[in-house]
Amino acid sequence: MKTESEANRAISLYADTVRRICFVHLKNYNDVEDVFQDVFLKYILHEKKFESDAHERAWLIRVTINACKDVLRNPFRRLVCSIEDITAEPFYIQESEGELLKYILSLPPKYKDVIYLFYYEGYSAVEIAEIMHKKENTVYTWLDRARKALKKQLGGEPIE
């Protein structure tokens, strides 16, 4: 179990990353906050030491993605429509990045993940492959397909 100071350090370093990943998947403030708390609870209860800060960050990203998938698989979610889904604009998005992020959010989950990790978090394809437990070539393929889908939606040049 982690100490309070370790937990506070992790939250101060990774809170924004965890919330943004949650939002990319869940698009709902309340679900984002629930998953955020679950992820950091798992972090606090995690017994093993991390090899480095990069390993710790990758672990948190992987746990966050898995927690979001768990929420999305919940059968209750199919029966309910949030008022935020109907009325609210995304709460973490500034106006300038809002249009592009709307297109990114419309991509299939595997493409959303690689685009977010590559462009917003600055991970290389090799690092993304390690985080997502996929082959490096799979990540390159997903990046390529995501870029093509975004190009088609935006009607412009591909993202490089």
Image (cartoon, rainbow, N blue to C red):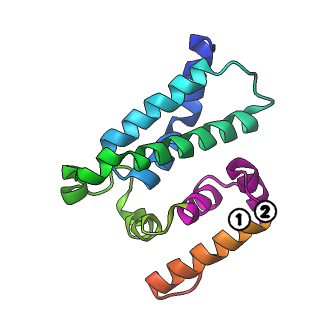
Q: Is the residue 158 above or below the residue 43 in the image?
A: below
Q: Which residues are magenta?
A: 110-136
Which quadrant holds the N terminus?
A: top right
Q: Is the residue 97 above or below the residue 69 in the image?
A: below
Which residue was labeled with disc 1? 139
Does the segment drawn in magenta span residue 117? yes
Q: Amino acid at mark 2?
A: Glu
**Where residue 43 sits in the image (x, y, percent)?**
59, 25
**Residue shown at 73% from the left, 69% from the top:** 140
Circle 1 packing at 10 Å, graded few (<14), some (14-19), many (20+), is many
Q: Amino acid at mark 1?
A: Val
In screen coordinates, is 36 left or right of 89?
A: right
The residues bearing labels 1 and 2 have C-alpha atoms spaced at a distance of 5 Å
Which residue was labeled with disc 2? 136
**Residue shown at 66% from the left, 76% from the top:** 144
Circle 2 packing at 10 Å, graded few (<14), some (14-19), many (20+), is some
Magenta stretch prevailing secondary structure: helix
Does the segment drawn in magenta span residue 53? no
**Where residue 124 sits in the image (x, y, percent)?**
74, 58
Looking at the picture, tell me which residue is in the foreground, 116 or 108: 108
